[in-house]
Image (cartoon, rainbow, N blue to C red):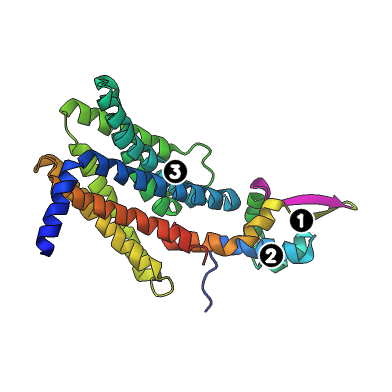
Amino acid sequence: MSKKRERLEIIKDILDAIRKKRKIKPTRLLYASNLSPQMFKVYVNELIEKEFIKVEINKGKKEFTLTKKGFDFLQEYHVIENFIENFGL
Amino acid sequence: MLNLIIQEAIQKAVENKEVIKLIYAFIIILICIIIAKKSNKIFKISSYKGAKYFRNAFIFYGLAFFSRYFLMFVFSRLDLRLFYLISNYFFEFFLIIAGFLLLYSLSWKKIENNKEILNLKILIFYSMALLLVVTDYLWRTYFLLFTSQIIIFSFIFAISFINYIEKGKNRKFLRIYCFSMLLALIAWILNALAGLLFNWNVFVMILIYSLNICVFLVFLFGVINSKN
């Protein structure tokens, strides 16, 4: 059985899925994130609130894109992960 | 021969007590600044609360050492007794808060509720620190400072030990961290003994300074090591 994903890893997976597609529709992101719809909503709202991602409306449809903060997070993910794990934060 | 060299070194240390204290404080403050800056960067990128509490703990440690070793040194030279005393109580307040925040950075995930707008626990820490400082002031002692820090570092050591048992195989630093928290606990116990029983014995104090520098260097190593 695979290990339960940590919160930080889930955030990384969501941001990574957006980065790969540059723009992604909510349903596709839900599949890519491998979360339940309820949990997906919680994470997406948090990422919007913390300005990691933003919502754009394209032809009347919602799409998610990464912000600079989201890019920075992905680039520094291993440093962040090491820091948190080193001290058990 | 070696014994003679050590004795001579200790003798010189006793003579230059103030200089040693200032160098010691300078090293610790420098380490605190580096750790606070690095953890601030982590917090800015990730918005991870644990990084924020960790950063704040080291800001308060830096402030505590600045108050105790620089401000108090300056005020004692200028013979400003009131400011000297105030700096001492600020030192105690900052040190207690820093301890609380360090412990909280390790345990916040189990306690905190994401929906809280105002973090009441942090307010409680500030209030408790203030209460402990005022009580110590009224009793004219450091008893509550020592007791609170020994309790806090017992918890920190216990948590870091559990982390080491659970994840130590994959992360070697957890072993060093756990050991350094044991050293920090020992340093606080020695501090209590030096302050309450041995009238700040110089040899015990040098041992405490050495232990503290080791502990802060381990923190610094952990922060720098995150890049690998």
Q: Determine the image quadrant of residue B81.
A: top left
Check disc 1 and give the amino acid type: Thr
- Is residue B100 visible in this depiction of the protein? no
Q: Residue at 65% across / 59% down in the picture?
A: A40
Element type where label 3 sits in the image: helix
Secondary structure of the residue carrying numbered label 1: strand
As rendered, which of A18 and B27 lies closer to the eye?
Answer: B27
Residue A47: percent from left, percent from top: 65, 52
Mark 1 residue crowding within 10 angstroms, few (<14) / some (14–19) / many (20+): some
Q: Which chain is home to disc 1?
A: A
Which residue is found at the position 35% from the left and 39% from the top?
Answer: B97
Q: Nearer the viewer, mark 2 or mark 3?
A: 3
- Whole-percent x, y for residue B156 in the image: 32, 54
Dots 1 and 3: beta carbons under 8 Å? Answer: no
Amino acid type at circle 3 is Asn
For residue B107, above or below residue A77: above
Q: Which residues are magenta?
A: A48-58
Query: What amino acid is at disc 2?
Result: Asp
Residue designated by label 2: A16
Other-residue count near label 2 (Cα within 10 Å), few / some / many at <14 / 14–19 / ≥20: some
